[in-house]
Amino acid sequence: MLPLIIGIAGGTGCGKTTVAKKIVLGIKGKKAIIIPQDAYYKDLSHLALKERKKFNFDHPAAFDNELLLNHLNNLIQGKPISMPVYSFQDYTRKKEVKKVKPADVIILEGILVLEEESIREMLNIKIYVDTDSDERFIRRLIRDTRERGRSLSSVVEQYLNRVKPMFLQFVEPSKRYADIIIPQGGLNRVAIDIITSTINARLNQFGVF
């Protein structure tokens, strides 16, 4: 039986991970896993740290989609994967990997999940989390300074020169591919309840999508 694959996209700090976690908590009687697109940033270990910091991580070319697609296909076939672990402090992959077992529901979340056609075609449900840009920037600023060791000035510089332009060029236009648009991110309890109820009903009725 094939698993249900859900894609959750949206701009930085919009609440994608929160939505994904709440959907997982709402799924009854089935195993669900979350695959972060961030784990599939290309390996930049061959570059000096100074050069890695200049890399545009918000452009579609920043992701190793070949590996991601290979891993999704393995999970669909019931095979475990060795998912990369990305270091936001070192701007590249860590040497260790994370073993991930197949599941009934696979949630892929990331800024450009809906932008890449080959990934989009694998999704049973496509979700876009739509949150006000000011709120998204504040969330990113807090996260990057507290959790990723970034300075205030570096976060602002990256946001203005790379994050915002890439959002306007690639992320926001991908909204048109969404089956469901969730305003207010993880705070939208009604939307998340409707999504999880629909998923549970279909899983209970057919076992899988």
Image (cartoon, rainbow, N blue to C red):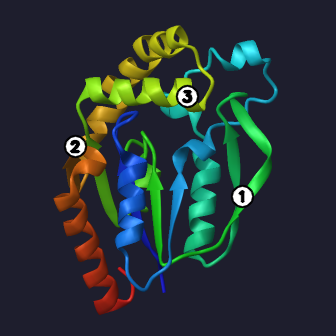
Secondary element at tag 3: helix
- Residue type beneath disc 2: Gln
- Residue at left 54%, top 23%? 145
Q: How far apart are marks 2 and 1 (CA)?
A: 31 Å
Q: Position of residue 193 (x, y in %)?
A: 22, 67
Look at label 1 and name its amino acid. Answer: Lys
Q: Can residue 34 be seen in this view?
A: yes
Label 2: few (<14), some (14–19) or many (≥20) C-alpha neighbours in 10 Å: some
Q: Where is residue 71 in the image (x, y as percent from the top left)?
A: 63, 61
Q: Mark 1 — residue?
A: 98
The residue sitting at 38% across, 89% down in the picture is 207
Name the quarter where the C terminus is drawn.
bottom left
Cβ–Cβ under 8 Å for marks 1 and 3: no
Residue nearest the viewer, comparing 118 with 74: 74
Which sits in the foreground, 98 or 143? 143
Describe the element under mark 2 as helix, strand or loop.
Answer: loop
The dot on residue 146 is: 3
Across and down, in percent, residue 151 comes to 57, 14
In the image, what residue occupies the spot 40% across and 23% down? 166
Nearer to me, 143 or 43: 143
| Residue 72, picture quadrant | bottom right
Residue 184's disc number:
2
CA gap, disc 1 to disc 3? 24 Å
Q: Do the residues labelled 2 and 1 touch (CB within 8 Å)?
A: no
Foreground mark, 3 or 2, reads 3
